[in-house]
Amino acid sequence: VSTQSTGCNMISVGKTSDLLKQGSRFLSGLEEAILKNIEAVRQLAKILRTSLGPNGMNKMIINERQKIFVTSDAASIIKELDVFHPAAKMAVMATEMQEREWGDATNFVITFCGELMQQAENLLIMGLHPADVIVGYEKAYEHFEKFIDGLVATEAKDLSNIDEITALLKSAVAAKHYGYESFLANLIARACIQVLPKNHKNFNVDNVRVAKVLGGAVTDSTIIKGMVLSRGAEGTIHSVTKAKVAVFAGAIDLGKTETTGKTRMNTVQQLLNYSKGEEKIIERDIKAVADAGAKVIVSGGSISEMAMHFIEKYGLMAIRSPSKFELRRICKAIGATPLVRMGSPLPEELGFCDLVEVTEVGSTKLTVFRQDKEDSGISTIILRAATQNTLDDIERAVDDGVNIFKAITRDSRFVAGAGACEIELAHLIKSFADQTPDQEQHAIKKFGEALEVIPRTLAENAGFNASEVISALYAAHSKEGGKHIGVDIESQGQVKDTLELKIYDHLETKKSAIRLATNAAITIVRIDQIIMAKPATGPKLPQPGKKPKFTQMN
């Protein structure tokens, strides 16, 4: 202990916490830092693990604005959970990265990361050094990358074949909305193929839109080649065929000057002439649009009553779309150019649509831009369901299916699903661990055991005896030609060939999930000290991506 005298003040430095500002916290060592970090990630994984697979349970989340979410989608759950622990936040960031990059297998990342933490905790309690655990996990991951490329079960050969794509998308959809996976996968496949460009790698997931209409059954859902707006038309004309469409980004009204001015009128005639001048300008602009051959006019802003009068006079169908993003998609669907000025559009600025009509689905009015013969850059799936929560859940299933299609355009290889790939990898990694003479062999073996969590969780969530299912899987995989045997949740816990059941997982999506989970686990195990500064007082800064909360002052 050292003591320094400066006048009347005495500063003693005896332990690390004395170096920091008062109110700071310092945690160090196995018990205080490493195991507490591991426990935080395990608790997060425990929350999400029961939502994995087709039989996964839903979570009810009520956020700070009292909005209720009922879903089994890990990305949506994590987005609404306000995770505070810094180690658990690392696992959350890995999940968010998986969602942004591939759009699927988010629950896989958290579940596998939590199991790696559980196995690391067992090794550390046994006396293994964290460095040995880290090296073992890194070696296991290196060999995992070599092994998984040899487990390819099938490959997408023709991306325009609806039946082939439907079979490949079915597993991703079933994980979100089990029971309707065949119907929904077919809808998604048709929607994606409709907007598939000649260069498949340029496929954009934003070109497949979803319109949610409350009421009816899930099987009432349908697909439209074109764009659907959740509102009706402004005038009395509700249907136009073979229509040229003029799209204006702003309001359809008289333009406003940048500066304010005053006009003095001394007589009633002057006022009447002023009003007639406005009418003539608006009529001239609307007549120019009609003379250009347009039958439909779309406005990105408001439509004045006077403009609406002349739109009706010249027999145009008027549609208002206040969202600029929606307006861009309309232009993409019909091949139009959004105009910022009123007046006669050029021929190349006009879009074309085979049918523009207002239709009523349930009690909701929809405006449909349908292309029958012309190519459309947008495809829309109209979803039906009895409750809003079910609609939201189906939308997430559609989102996952579209993202898997996007992944297929990048890499068309698939591995066996239903836990078959994980069990085979566990078997291969354990065999490699037995051939490793160093201390790392224990961590390598535990990495292989951690892969068992996927088939075990699938069996547990389906209500089967997980130990019996895992034993049956290992027995099947030890035989010749048994590397594609997985859990069949529809046959009381029996194991079957996933190639016959047509259950597949996308190869690159799975590789990315295991890579992110392993990196997160290694990063967390590498932490041996936690130093927390005293929280700042005053109002909290809004977090990125979240709206700030305002308090009402009396």
Image (tube, rainbow, N blue to C red):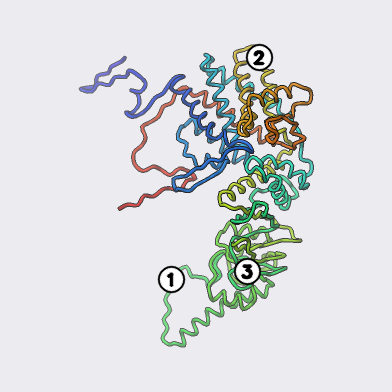
Label 2 CA crowd tier, 10 Å (few <14, some 14–19, many 20+): some
Q: Which residue extends farthest top?
A: 437
Q: Examine the rendered structure and indicate whether residue 13 appears above or below residue 48.
A: above
> In this rendering, would 541 be left or right of 294?
left
Secondary element under disc 1, as helix, strand or loop, is loop
Q: Examine the rendered structure and indicate whether residue 63 appears above or below residue 421.
A: below
CA–CA distance in space, label 3 to label 1: 30 Å
Give coordinates of residue 291: x percent, y percent.
Answer: 67, 75
Residue closer to the observer: 424 or 53:
53
Secondary element under disc 2, as helix, strand or loop, is loop
Classify residue 165 by image quadrant.
top right
Q: Amino acid at mark 3?
A: Ile
Label 3 CA crowd tier, 10 Å (few <14, some 14–19, many 20+): many
Q: Which mark is residue 436?
A: 2
Q: Earlier in the sequence, mark 2 or mark 3?
A: 3
Q: Earlier in the sequence, mark 2 or mark 1?
A: 1
Residue receiving disc 1: 260
Q: Which mark is residue 297?
A: 3
